[in-house]
Image (cartoon, grey):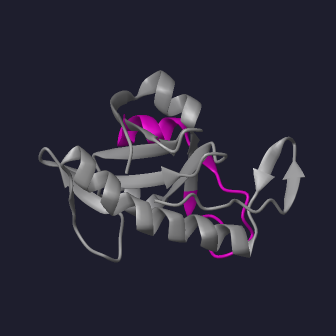
Amino acid sequence: MRKMGYVVSEKSEGIVQQDKQSGATGNAFGKETAPLIAKAIGATMLSPRSNEATFQGSRVVIKCAAEKTNCVGVTYRMLERLDSVFGAFQLADGSFEVLALPVRIYKEQMRATRSRGASAGKVGLVGHNIFESHGVMLRTIRV
């Protein structure tokens, strides 16, 4: 699997901001990677249009972050129908650290996106560090 680049448009308070192109790149990366992660961990994707899946009887979403991306975002609406958020964070060697975070903790720890575009007021972000400190490590895998 190839690594997707991340385009930096500006920095604000040390946080990398997405622009339209980098957002589209991240979306494509997630759509390509989530089904591969699902297969590797034994989850079943629910639809080719979404990164939602079932895993051991629970409804989850698999959110993928390329190597230099340190957070993932989930819409508030989607959170209402999930049990957990799975964060698949790409490491320097190309493998992925897959961590599960209960949706209750995701909601407690999320911050609003700074987007002024389509996701403004609709998406909550959680960092890799929260997944590591409050989540459960599922596996480190190479897809």
In-front residue for pair 91/111: 91
Question: For the N terminus, which image quadrant?
Answer: bottom left
Reply above or below: 128 against 90: above
Based on the picture, tell me whether residue 116 belongs to the magenta stretch.
yes
Based on the picture, tell me whether residue 31 belongs to the magenta stretch.
no
Reply above or below: 31 against 92: below
Q: Going by the image, does 81 lie left or right of 95?
A: left
Q: Which residues are magenta?
A: 100-123
Q: Position of residue 9 (x, y in %)?
A: 84, 63
Report the residue at 59% width, 38% height from top.
Answer: 92
Q: Is residue 60 visible?
A: no
Q: Going by the image, does 28 lie left or right of 45?
A: right
Q: Is residue 116 visible?
A: yes
Report the residue at 47% width, 62% height from top.
Answer: 30
Q: Position of residue 53 (x, y in %)?
A: 25, 58
Q: Position of residue 36 (x, y in %)?
A: 33, 58
Q: Going by the image, does 130 lie left or right of 56?
A: right
Q: Residue furthest left?
A: 57
Report the residue at 84% width, 41% height from top.
Answer: 14
